[in-house]
Amino acid sequence: MQEGSSFRPVIEIATSDFITTAAAVAGGADRIELCANLAEGGTTPSYGTIRQCREKFIVALYPIIRNRGGDFLYTPDEFSIMLRDVRLCKELGCDGVVIGLLQADGTIDLSRTAQLVEAAYPMGVTFHRAFDRCADPFVAMEQLIETGCERILTSGQKPSVMDGIELVAALQKEADGRIIIMPGSGVRKENIRLLAQQTGCTEFHSSLRGKAKGGMDFIHPAFKDSAESYINNAIDPEEVRALREVLLS
């Protein structure tokens, strides 16, 4: 993409379990956002999943710290769970965590974000797309820089990043290297080059969510049309590899 430069994009893949993580790693992912329940936007994976992925893969591993789907306004008990999960990720040797907390008025929950960043240290911290639900993205970015977050995952406050590309570009310019702006939500090989060109971003997030028939031989007649019974989440390693190839072509 950038002739004569040392440009090397970072490809982060959101995975939903051990199998999809293995596929993303096989495809050359630089970093994994390890989740459960991607259909709900991602929730914290189990201890066993985090540990198995950490033991099996050298790639940078960032579990999401989100104990439920829904909004990003958390009770004291929910925040206590988050603190415990962050500390657990550190004990397991993860490279970072992914967090996102808001106040009811759409501002960043600064106090508790700072507590999670402190608890995570020396792990890195990504602030996820809770950012896209905040009231003022430029104020929020400055606050996240102050808390010590290393990157913001954003679709430019739109459901799809291609619709929010102008805001992503403006955030990247305003950030000026002080925090990483990482586009996500709808990043595919068909648009990643355009995203890079129009935003100047160098890190990209994609889930590349697919489905594959499971390995069951016996299909119960009453559930033959049940996707949740016989269809599994899947990632094609070649689709991961294609993201980088398109950028570097």
Image (tube, helix red, strand yellow):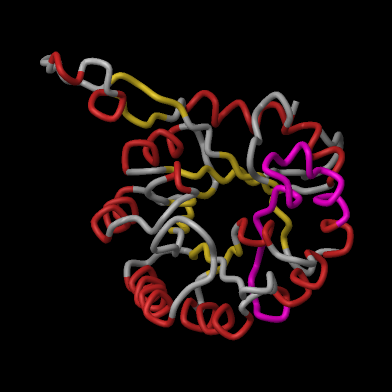
* Nearest the eye: 46 or 125: 46
Point out residue 242 in the picture as x, y percentages from the top left corner: 61, 26
Residue in the picture at 62% in, 56% down = 129
193 sits to left or right of 59: right
**Residue 66, magenta (yes or no):** no
Residue in the picture at 39% in, 43% down = 16
Point out residue 125 in the picture as x, y percentages from the top left corner: 56, 68
181 sits to left or right of 51: right
Residue in the picture at 32% in, 29% down = 232
Point out residue 56 in the picture as x, y percentages from the top left corner: 31, 48
Point out residue 84 in the picture as x, y percentages from the top left corner: 35, 77
* Nearest the eye: 195 or 100: 100
User: Which stretch appears magenta?
Assistant: 146-170
* Nearest the eye: 23 or 210: 210
Q: Quadrant of the C terminus?
A: top right
Q: Is residue 19 above or below residue 57?
A: above
